[in-house]
Image (cartoon, rainbow, N blue to C red):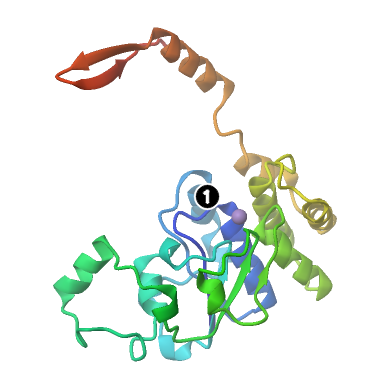
Amino acid sequence: MELVFAHNNMDFDSLSAQFALTKLYPSCKMVLGYPLTGNLRSFITLNRSYLPIVEVKYVDLSKVTRFFLVDCQHFDRLDSGVRKLMEDSEQSASPSPSPSQSASKSQSASPPQTPIEALKLCRPLTIFDHHERDKDSLMSLATEDSHVEVVGSATTILVEKIRKKKIALTQFDATLLAIGIFEDTGCLTYAGTTARDAECVAFLIQHGADLSVVREYIRPKIEQEQVNLLEELLRAAQVINVQGHRFVVATAHVR
Ligand SMILES: [Mn+2]
């Protein structure tokens, strides 16, 4: 079994890239990057049975052969449980060989920063990311076949591999992968969007991606009604000073 991680507070690109990886490696399980919010959370709740998700606390490490990380290169952006799992406890220098329960609890509240050069991972790690390559990151420990390239989404890099390997996709698969690319590229309108993102979207539409479902999850962040309300609040805003603290008070009416 392999495990795929993503950054904390994961977004649709992270989820789609993780899912794409499970298409490339069918025994790979997804470890979600909590907390889950908004539409992403609703999507996962509704479709959990289609997603090969595993909770980190139930992972039997002896069955894990390899780690993947998508949409991220930084150790400090991972969950404390994930970081603990990844670290080779025998090789990583630790002053106290058997930390007590209370010690590990206080660690998760404010994680100690392990310098990347001191970090030893207990399994090979392969990274797929679309952010600028950072050599002071997990990239310095990642396997040769890691793939970091600046395109609109991490999902794009993995969809290209799925396409090359001619892996079959269901409508659900194609739809989820399209959501990831659409979200990170602002429906192909953001400055970082490349022709490769658009080509992947075209490929996913050819393979049945359902744009009505995409539209359901990729909504404008705020609706016009909320914009009107915000404008009304800004117009009505009054700054008051109470014992040296500034407060903004505003009222508005929703019709
Ligand atoms: Mn991304």
Position of residue 196 measured from the top left corner of the image (x, y, whole percent):
81, 56
How many numbered dots are placed on residues in this image?
1
Position of residue 142 measured from the top left corner of the image (x, y, whole percent):
57, 78
Tell me the residue at 19%/86% (across/down). Answer: 98
Q: Is residue 146 visible?
A: yes
- Nearest the eye: 76 or 221: 76
Q: Is residue 29 visible?
A: no
- Nearest the eye: 52 or 225: 225
Position of residue 207 measured from the top left corner of the image (x, y, whole percent):
81, 59
Ligand 1 shows up in which quadrant of the image? bottom right
Q: Secondary structure at mark 1?
A: helix
Amino acid under disc 1: Leu
**Disc 1 marks which residue?**
40
Q: Is residue 172 above or below residue 38?
A: below
Q: Is mark 1 within 8 Å of ligand 1?
A: no
Q: Is residue 243 above or below residue 153?
A: above
Res 115 quadrant in image: bottom left
Position of residue 233 measured from the top left corner of the image (x, y, whole percent):
42, 14
Q: Quadrant of the N terminus?
A: bottom right
**Within-10-Å neighbours for mark 1: few <14, some 14–19, many 20+:** some
**Does 211 sit left or right of 56 as displayed?**
right
